[in-house]
Image (cartoon, rainbow, N blue to C red):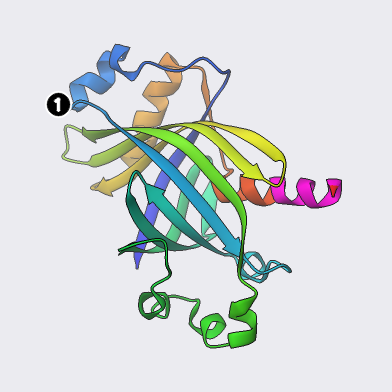
Amino acid sequence: MALEQEIKLLVKGEEKIDLSLLSYLSELSQEIPRIDHLVSTYFDTPDLLLSQQRLGLRMRQINDHYLQTVKTSGSVKNGLHQREEWEYDLAGPEWDLSTLRMTPLLTMIDDAETWSQLAPLFVTDFLRETMQLTLSDGTQIELAYDCGEVRSGQLTTDIHEIELELKAGDSEQLAVVANVLSQQLNITLSDVSKAQMGYELLTKSRNNG
C-alpha cells in the first residue's frame, strides 16, 4: 500500500498545451516528455457496493502493459488528493486475486455471490504526456498531462487536466509548482477525480436509459 498525494489541475478550453514551451518545466526536467496511451476500465457491482465503501477498482492498460489498482476515496482539499493505493503489475487483463486479497477487497472477493456481480461500468481513455521534475530541494514530482475522454454507455465527457504527483520529498512543493503553472496556463484546481467523473457519467447514462 502506498499513499498517493497529487494536485489535480483542470485545463480550461480545448486547445492542447505544448509543455516544451514552458521554460519553467524545462529547467526542472532534463528528459524528453514520455507519451503513453492509457485505457482504464473501472469495475463495481450493479448497486455500486465499492463506491458506497469509498473504494475504487480499475484495470489499466498502458500501451501493452497491464495494472490492477485499488484506491480509497481518501481526502481532497484545494485540489490536493490524498488516498491509499494498492497497485500491481499483471501479465494480462485478468485479476490477480492473491494480490487483491491484500487490499480492502478481501471480504468482497471471498463472498462469491457479490464478487460474481462485479462488472465494468465506465472507461477512461486518454493520452498521457509525462515529465519527471526535480526541484532545488530534491523533491521529485511527476507531471502528467492527460487528454482524452470518459465513456459510460453512449455518453462521453472530456478529460483535459494536469496531475502533479509527489514521488519523493516535500508535499508542500506540489502547491508551489501548481501556483507557478497557474500563472502561465489557463488552469484551475480540481477536486474531481477521473473515477468521480466516471460515476457521474454512469448516473446520467442510467437515467437516460
Tag 1: Cα neighbours inside 10 Å, few (<14), some, or many (≥20)? few
Residue 166 at what x, y percent from top left? Answer: 31, 46
Q: Return the x and y of residue 40 as percentages of the image width and height.
A: 48, 50
- Number of callouts in the render? 1
Q: Answer with the quarter of the image where residue 177 lies.
A: top left
Q: Is residue 205 magenta?
A: yes
Q: Would residue 128 be found to the left or right of residue 104 on screen?
A: left
Q: From the viewer's perspective, is 164 left or right of 158? A: left
95 or 49, which lies in front? Answer: 95
Q: Residue at x 46, y 45 (%)?
A: 39
Image x and y of residue 106, in percent: 48, 82
> In the image, 3: left or right of 150?
left
Residue situated in front as seen by the camera: 133 or 154: 154
The magenta region covers 201-208
Q: Nearer the viewer, residue 131 or 171?
A: 131
Q: Quadrant of residue 188?
A: top right
Residue type pointed to by label 1: Gln
**Residue at x 46%, y 17% (from the top left corner):** 16
**Residue lying at the far right of the rendered structure:** 208
Asked if 27 appears above or below 62 in the picture, the reply is above
Vertical position of residue 177 compared to residue 185: above or below: below
Task: Label 1: state its secondary structure.
Answer: loop
In the displayed structure, 95 sits above or below 29; it is below
Residue drawn at x 39%, y 38% as measured from the top left: 37
In the picture provided, is 44 more to the left or to the right than 183? Answer: right
Residue 184 position (above or below residue 33): above
| Residue 178: in magenta span | no
Q: Which residue is mark 1?
A: 30
Q: Residue at x 37, y 35 (%)?
A: 144
- Main SS class of the magenta portion in the image: helix
Q: Find residue 161 and report its horizontal and vertical position in percent.
A: 49, 31
